[in-house]
Image (cartoon, rainbow, N blue to C red):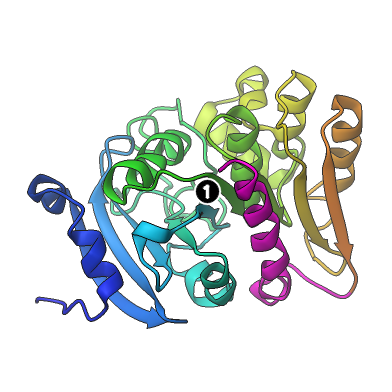
Amino acid sequence: MTIAISTAVVICFLLHVTSKDRMSIQLLKSHTCYGGTVAFWSHASASTQTEMRFSTFIPECGIECVQGALIWLSGLTCTEENAMSKAGAQQHLAKHHMMMICPDTSPRGLNLPHEHDAYDFGSGAGFYVDATTEGYRDHYNMYSYIVNDVVGLLRTYFKINVPVSISGHSMGGHGALTIGLKHPELFASISAFSPITQPSQSAWGQKALSGYLSNDPVSWRNYDSCALLDSGHTHPHSILIDQGLDDEFYPAQLRTAEFEATCDRAKQSCIINYQANYDHSYYFIATFMKQHIEFHARAQESHL
């Protein structure tokens, strides 16, 4: 089935890519939103050795006038669609001429042992690590997927040559913090909603890290934002976090206070907003997404 491309924004993008590129990335569907275009794509990933999906928002002005880009990493059970349909980001992205790209949260269609047994491990729960355990190490390389494939998509396919920031929610907030701290050269700024800040000390994190990395606490430290800060990984820009005080996973799974204390110890500037009456849902994210996009827009402007 051929999907009509109804907006000039996506057409302008397609004019930038070569015939070879068009064979390796496929537009699945697109929708006009706040004058810009929400689009859903698939491509062959070198990191996961599978087909991967992602979504994008490109503002009405098109690729040529994009002034910044935001990588959004979603949480447990999510796909490339959740943030694009629930976070309410598009109107704020459009105002700041910012593009957003939302990758899926794991490889799909593999049917590995125990891959679909639980919501917090395997499909929909890649945890933004590069797995080393048998079966998973060939495909569950979501850390490399973000750093190499997703950044590569922005730079090579979408021809984005402007500052890029990273953000996410819950498991995705963990990914944003760890990837952003390890790669300050790639990301102008980092933010997160309700992030899992110390996965080596939380039940969610311990389950995922042991499954993907085996019972090796030393390797776990590479994917623990508190441990990374303690080992000298910092970011030159302040980190922004919003945490709901009615979040059912706070504090045990998220350990926000431990992250705040570690930032103080590591001299990492960090703004943590504890929001009364808000839970772990996208209703919370949609309420404060405007402030996060403004935060990234200011950081990106200073990098232009």
Front position in the image: 155 or 133: 155
Look at the image and say whether residue 139 sits in the magenta stretch.
no
Look at the image and say whether residue 298 sits in the magenta stretch.
yes
Q: Main secondary structure of the magenta part?
A: helix
For the magenta stretch, what is the residue range? 277-304
Q: Amino acid at mark 1?
A: Phe
Q: In this image, 285 relative to 66: left or right?
A: right
The residue positioned 85% from the left and 69% from the top of the image is 246
Above or below — where is 233 with respect to 174? above
Front position in the image: 250 or 113: 250
Residue 233: x and y in percent read 70, 24
* Residue 55 seen in the figure: yes
The residue positioned 32% from the left and 47% from the top of the image is 159
Above or below — where is 257 with respect to 16? above
Residue 261 falls in image quadrant: top right
Residue 268 falls in image quadrant: top right
The residue positioned 59% from the left and 32% from the top of the image is 210
The residue positioned 23% from the left and 81% from the top of the image is 6
Task: Look at mark 1 in the image and give the residue it sits on.
Answer: 121
Residue 236: x and y in percent read 72, 32
Q: In this image, 67 relative to 40: left or right?
A: right
Q: In this image, 20 relative to 242: left or right?
A: left
